[in-house]
Image: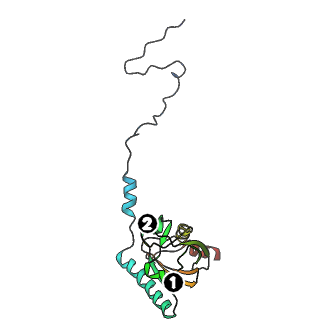
Amino acid sequence: SQKRKAPEPGQLRRSGRVTGLPEQPSYLEGAGQRDYRGVYEAYAVWKGPTDEERAGALAKAEELQRRIHRIRCPAFVKPMTHSLAMNAVQMLIPKDFLKYLPAHDEAVVVVDEADDEFHMMYNAHRQGGKHYYLDKGWKGFAFDHDLADGDCLVFHMTERAKFKVYIFRANPDYESDQTSDDSEDEE
């Protein structure tokens, strides 16, 4: 039988099967030394709307609300926060609007400016007080309309269980995907 040669000092001892193979990369190098700078830089780059942009969207929404009230129709303004626009599953309805709503749960239809309908549930549950809200469809509506922090929505009650919604963007540079898709289709 053939005698094995002793490994040189500092050299790994290997079986005969892998001795002739090329050196394998170490996939563990740098493991445990995570670099979070990219994550924090992403937060530093993202900036919500300025106070002026937020105020501009709110002023436009309140002006539309005043015009709707002049024709004797109920409406309310709902400014979007980051959490409400991005990950809320329900939207609280302002307390001063409750006089127009039933005291029981009811399915409602929310119609956007493109006349697309979104079915939601109006909940009249009491949770430590009176909290009335729209859910079961709110998150999808917010996602489909790319709602963002600072945007303002005007909910115009057109029928007992139907709202027309108008969106006022805080970001002046916002262009919806529909707008860019429409312009590409025309070419």
How much space separates mark 1 and mark 2, taking CA atoms? 27 Å
Residue drawn at (38%, 60%) of the image: 43
Residue 94: where, in percent of width, then height?
44, 78
Q: Is residue 139 left or right of residue 129?
A: right
Residue drawn at (55%, 20%) of the image: 17
Q: Quadrant of residue 56?
A: bottom left
Residue 38: where, in percent of width, then height?
39, 54
Residue 127: where, in percent of width, then height?
45, 67
Residue drawn at (43%, 66%) of the image: 83
Callout 2: 10 Å neighbours few (<14), some, many (20+)? few
Residue 15: where, in percent of width, then height?
51, 19
Say which quadrant the C terminus sits in. Answer: bottom right
Colour scheme of this structure image? rainbow
Nearer the observer, 51 or 64: 64
- Name above or below for residue 27 compared with residue 74: above
Residue type at mark 2: give it.
Ser
Nearer the observer, 67 or 6: 67
Residue type at mark 1: give it.
Tyr
- Count of picture labels: 2
Q: Element type at marker 2? A: helix
Nearer the observer, 152 or 90: 90
- Name above or below for residue 21 compared with residue 178: above
Say which quadrant the N terminus sits in. Answer: top right
Q: Is residue 143 left or right of residue 40?
A: right
Q: Which residue is mark 2?
A: 83
Q: Which residue is mark 1?
A: 100
Q: Is residue 119 left or right of residue 146?
A: right
Nearer the observer, 171 or 155: 155
> Which mark lies nearer to you, 1 or 2?
1
Q: Is residue 138 left or right of residue 39?
A: right
Callout 1: 10 Å neighbours few (<14), some, many (20+)? few
Q: Element type at marker 1? A: helix
